[in-house]
Amino acid sequence: MAPTVRSNPLRDPRDRRLPRLPDASALVVFGATGDLARKKLIPAVYDLFSRGLLPPGFVLLGFARRDWSDGDFVDFARESAEKGARTPFRDEVWDRLAGSVRFLQGSFDDDAAFDRLASTLEDLERSHGIGGNAAFYLSIPPSAFPVVLKQMQRTGLSSAQDSGGWRRVVIEKPFGHDLASARDLNALVDDVFTPSGVYRIDHYLGKETVQNLFALRFANSLYEPIWNSQFVDSVQITMAEDVGIGTRAGFYDETGAARDVLQNHLLQLLALTAMEEPVSFGPETIRTEKLKVLRAVSLPDDLARFAVRGQYEQGWLAGERVPGYLDEKDIPPGSRTETFAAVRLGIETRRWAGVPFYLRTGKRLPRRVTEIAIVFKKAPHLPFDHTDTAELGNNQLVIRVQPDEGVTLKFGSKVPGSAMEVRDVAMDFLFGEAFTEALPEAYERLILDVLLGDATLFPNNAEVEESWRIVDPLEEYWANTTPHRYRAGSWGPAAADEMLAADGRRWRRP
């Protein structure tokens, strides 16, 4: 019989300075032998365990089609942790974790395999004292979501009432491929699990620099007074990748850049940037403010000019020639899938009326970078000669999400010398220099939050549906167009530069 766990009477549950430990529980990973599990999930579990953030009764249970034993999966997991863990790999730590690693072989349409899974979780209640607590991570293709969810419903795996503990499900993006499919999937998930037990994961929201937006805006009196249309000229949100599609040809050619990144990552960053101050730092209050922003987003009237998509051709990147998208393995000839998307959006609120939000994402761009740039209006009067300020641009506040995580403030300063010459300079804050602790991986924070039952950083179904409301008209317009071509190693098609030039602006070069 599992020992009774009592809370510490000296511990204030509101005190976030001390680490919170989840209840004893199992993390069941469907698709446990895939790339996401190997590169992110298993290393994140090791890092959490290494930092003492997982309870003694924690179990990692892999589910996949490979005909493996527990020992085979333990070897796979060890190799994954050694290669991908952020914290130093230590044999003694792994030996303790390995004793709680299990594997089940089966396919998603195999009733017997899911029956064994239900039986295994019952056994773990006796051996590890998990108390009926389990989180199910769907690290699988979106097309497999319905069959797995129905299997969990059939076997009672999704029922907290039947298990006597809590049951949660983690669903990776993309959540549907348009508004109609997202609504269908939402209805199915909410029917199988309770709405509070559904965690739609967007790993960008787990990044420290994204969460720092809350602190930057709401813990300081410096920025909030100027965080509005009176002072802000425009906002640019960029997610650039220097890699191509890798081994994801089948998924990517059906999805494209807008559905893969714009619908989730970029619109979530937009919502966090533009939201009003929440009344408290809780899941529902933050979701409410983000949802207000997404509902206020407006598309440009002229989509031909202000919604641009592109597809990379062969070019040079980091000194190497790289193939074009149509030359990538398994990409059909003549594919019109976009690898670059840029759009100008508005937010119809008093705070942001008239401020354009420029969003762009692309593959095979010069460097990997994600950033949010707040571009401020120029001073209404400059008492300097024009030649004195020829090299002076707009003030900018840049939140660097990755890499080189931190914040840059760009402003004008006098150049030393006898002449009055004003030029742009920058002040930098780097997480790596200001804090001794290394930044945790996004998946560490998000997996821990799932086990703790903290939904603050997870979009709900209303946010997902509003995001599709924004993207669906773009996809409908683009369906009858051919993407602009751009050379690999450039910053996208010329049409994207022309989009900003039409407004008298230009893209910031990260």
Image (cartoon, helix red, strand yellow):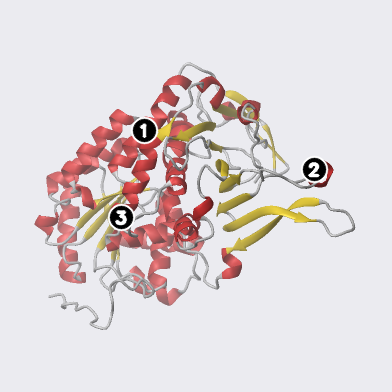
Q: Secondary structure at mark 3?
A: helix
The answer for how far apart the CA atoms under marks 1 and 3 are is 21 Å
Q: Determine which of the numbered discs, if any, sits on residue 458 in the image.
A: none
Mark 3 or 2 closer to N-term? 3
Q: Which quarter of the image is occupied by the N terminus? A: bottom left
Relative to residue 456, is residue 463 depicted above or below? above
| Tag 2: amino acid | Ala
Mark 2 or 1 closer to N-term? 2
Is residue 47 visible to us here?
yes
Q: Residues within 10 Å of mark 2 (few under 14, many from 20)?
A: few
Q: Which residue is mark 3?
A: 283
Q: Which residue is mark 2?
A: 390
Query: Left or right: where does residue 248 sit relative to residue 12?
Result: right
Among all residues in the image, which is located at the extreme right? Answer: 418
Q: Position of residue 379 (x, y in %)?
A: 67, 46
Q: Which residue is mark 1?
A: 468
Among all residues in the image, which is located at the extreme bottom? Answer: 10
The answer for how far apart the CA atoms under marks 2 and 1 are is 43 Å
Q: Secondary structure at mark 2?
A: loop
Q: Residues within 10 Å of mark 1 (few under 14, many from 20)?
A: many
Residue in view at x 48 percent, y 70 percent = 89
Q: Position of residue 229 (x, y in %)?
A: 52, 42
Q: Position of residue 382 (x, y in %)?
A: 73, 46
Mark 1 or 3 closer to N-term? 3
